[in-house]
Amino acid sequence: MPSQRSRRLRKKLYLDEFAVFGFVLTLKLNTDDDEALDHFIESLADYAESRHLLVGGGGMTNIELVIGSALRYGSATEQDRESIKAWIEERDEAELVELGPLLDLHQIEFAD
């Protein structure tokens, strides 16, 4: 039988009501130009920041990014997902390969 954790411990571990949600997206860049890649990523980061989101990840032509809230205990929302998706679809530099669901960012595991 699992023990109940105190509110303080749940907060430190980002569990339950303190879970932080975000999403993973995979893009394919339509150019091999490093300058175009830099410009696209900077533009995406600027757009995300305008929605109080942070972007992390990387790649060259196949790019995997994690997007989450810039607020300490904030979470990305379904509206944030749809907004980022629409922004990417309006651009010519990259095509959206996969847009993952909202998930707990402190519980995901990435393959090396």
Image (tube, grey):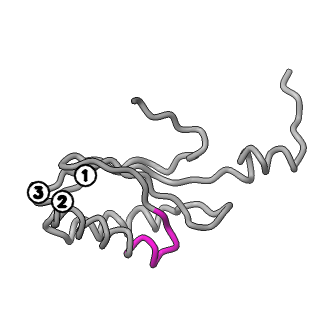
| Residue annotated with mark 2 | 94
Q: How far, Cα to Cα, is label 3 from label 1?
A: 9 Å
Whether label 2 touches label 1, CB < 8 Å: yes
Q: Is residue 61 or residue 96 the one in the foreground?
A: 61
Give the residue displayed 43% in from the left and 52% down from the top.
Answer: 66
Q: Give the range drawn in magenta.
A: 47-54
| Vertical position of residue 100 compared to residue 41: above or below | above
| Vertical position of residue 53 compared to residue 110: above or below | below
| 34 displayed left or right of 52 | left
Say which amino acid is labelled 3: Asn
| Residue annotated with mark 1 | 27
Give the residue displayed 18% in from the left and 57% down from the top.
Answer: 95
- The verdict on residue 53 being magenta is yes
Give the residue displayed 45% in from the left and 78% down from the top.
Answer: 50
Whether label 3 touches label 2, CB < 8 Å: yes
Residue lying furthest front in this view? 34
| Residue annotated with mark 3 | 30
